[in-house]
Image (tube, rainbow, N blue to C red):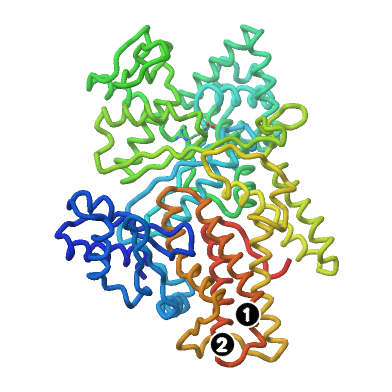
Amino acid sequence: MIRIIEILSVRVRDAIKAATGLDADPLLRISADSRFGDYQANGIMAIAKQAKSNPRALAGQVVEKLDVADLCETPEIAGPGFINFRLKPDFLAIRLMEVKSDSVRLGISPTQNHTKVVVDFSGPNIAKQMHVGHLRSTIIGDAICRLLEFEGYDVIPQNHIGDWGLQIGMVVHAMMASTLETKTWAGASGALLSIEEVHNRIEKSPITLIELEKMYKRLSEQEKTDENLAEAVRNSVRHLQLKEPVFLAFWENARKITLKTCFELYDYLGGIFKLDDIRGESFYADRLAPVVQELKDKGIAVESDGAVCVFAPGFVSKEGNPLPLIVQKSDGAFLYATTDLAALKFRVQELGAKKIIYVTDARQELHFKMVFAVARMAGWVPEDVSLEHVTFGSVLGEDGKPFKTRSGENVKLRDLLDEAVSRAKRVVEEKNPELPEEKKNDIAAAVGIGAVKYADYSNNRTSDYVFSFDRMLAMEGNTAPYMQYAYARVKSIERKALEKGINASEELALITNITLTEPTEIELAKTLCRYDEAIYSAAYDLRPNYLTAYLYDLAGKFSAFYTQCPVLTAGPESRPSRLLLCDLTAKNIAHGLSNLLGIKVVEQM
Ligand code: ARG
């Protein structure tokens, strides 16, 4: 099915050509105010200027040549030369039959270009629990993957975890110190113990991520004042960098412990990432030196104060001096930027990405701008490959400051989600005390997690937003519980039908033609027919809030319809059509929430 706005756009373009001989974009838009129609062509004024004619007269000539009678009522000319279009109920009925015939994609065709898109998101760091700062990247990245995949792109999620470098060396040092006696490894890179024995010891002393995080923090504090310790840590970092087996064994363990906890959260959030999608900084470790060498060979990187830097044109400091992207420090160490350059090269040259999307907060904007510029200078990114940094604002507490615990720490993502689920559980207990415990828990998980995700999605991605459990769990307004309730309500109609002895699925199967007469029926049908437009704009701008806004609008249109139009008590001339409107509304909400946003729906709340 082609989007309605596309069909109209082509028809108006043809009419413009017939009237003026010009091939021009009619600038078709969805009307902001439905009283004036469903779509409007805004391009006539500009074309009239070009053709040196009167815009209103030109609009009239275009309308004369227009052939849209199968879709729309007679188009109307408004203001200085806008053309307004209103869809015909008969056309909506035909479209809805197409939606009905495809319960998987709801009649929406995938794009024909199966471009490979890498989406880089989440990116937690080893030995650290994920906190609220990781929420947005993780779930916005996931929604982007889902949207693009549905649109037909070949999506490759990449989780660029921080699992290499100085900090990880420290983590490894701390773990070794707590597991092995110092003399067995300090300075001797573990030579006194067999690798089997090392694995054995690691296995015998399991640690949690929380302990790991504490160990790391303690060490980094102690190291500041203890030069001997600092030297020992530097040694460990070096040993790890050289991939000595004992050090690698601890590194692997730290990674395993961290990823286990991350995946518990990813699963909790709705099955984000497969193990294969984890390709962290360590993966690029051996590619860093060659990357720097290549930049030097190409004359792009230069030595500056002992460090290796790239001065990309256009980047200057506040004082107006050229701003370097440092790719190797004077002590030989590589940096975050070096890894990102290696990753970019890998993604284009080996994964075959035609587009790479990075989802991080806005603070990394300059970093990515410079990395992109340097990669292009190096010739690693052909012109037809696009690089996009998708940023987002901060999550704020009710006081308008960055969201922190009372003691001023970052809020752990786990605690946040647990709290949301337990609050949702209280609501379920109150509303439906008679449900079996297991059911209550399922609903609470769907509503609690759904509320956190939906609240994030429904805000404009680039703005900060205030995190409020009360608001996100409210049953009114543009919230997950409201949408989930809307779904459950539609589904309850089917159940009620059965109780009344009406076999809804049989009636639906027999429908060959939908009748739409009541204004609220027509409005609901129209909204259902425009789901593809909402998905397209959300995927095009990478903004999930376009989709939540659509779903909220749909729920509102359904409510109006359901208040105005009896369904189960309607006569045989309208009942099947109304049952179908209910069925398609349920399918649409479920598809939007669950397939595209990864938010579970429940049959009952
Ligand atoms: N680990 C990074 C951080 O915590 C995020 C990684 C983002 N992706 C990237 N390719 N740099 O900020």
Question: Quick check: can you spot residue 151?
Answer: yes
Q: Residue at x 49, y 41 (%)?
A: 121
In the displayed structure image, the side of residue 207 where residue 142 appears, left or right: left
In the displayed structure image, the side of residue 294 where residue 194 appears, left or right: right
CB-based contact (under 8 Å), mark 1 and mark 2: yes
Name the one closer to the observer, 258 or 359: 359
Name the one closer to the observer, 40 or 218: 40
**Badge 1 is on which residue?**
565
Name the one closer to the observer, 48 or 136: 48
Name the one closer to the observer, 328 or 442: 442
Residue 42 figure quarter: bottom left
Circle 1 SS class? loop
Circle 2 SS class? loop
Residue 432 figure quarter: bottom right
Mark 2, Cα crowd under 10 Å, few <14 / some 14-19 / many 20+, is: some
Q: Residue at x 42, y 57 (%)?
A: 149
Image coordinates of residue 311 in percent, x first then y, are 32, 18
**Badge 2 is on which residue?**
574
Amino acid under disc 1: Cys
Mark 1, Cα crowd under 10 Å, few <14 / some 14-19 / many 20+, is: some
Q: How far is mark 1 from mark 2, CA to CA?
A: 10 Å
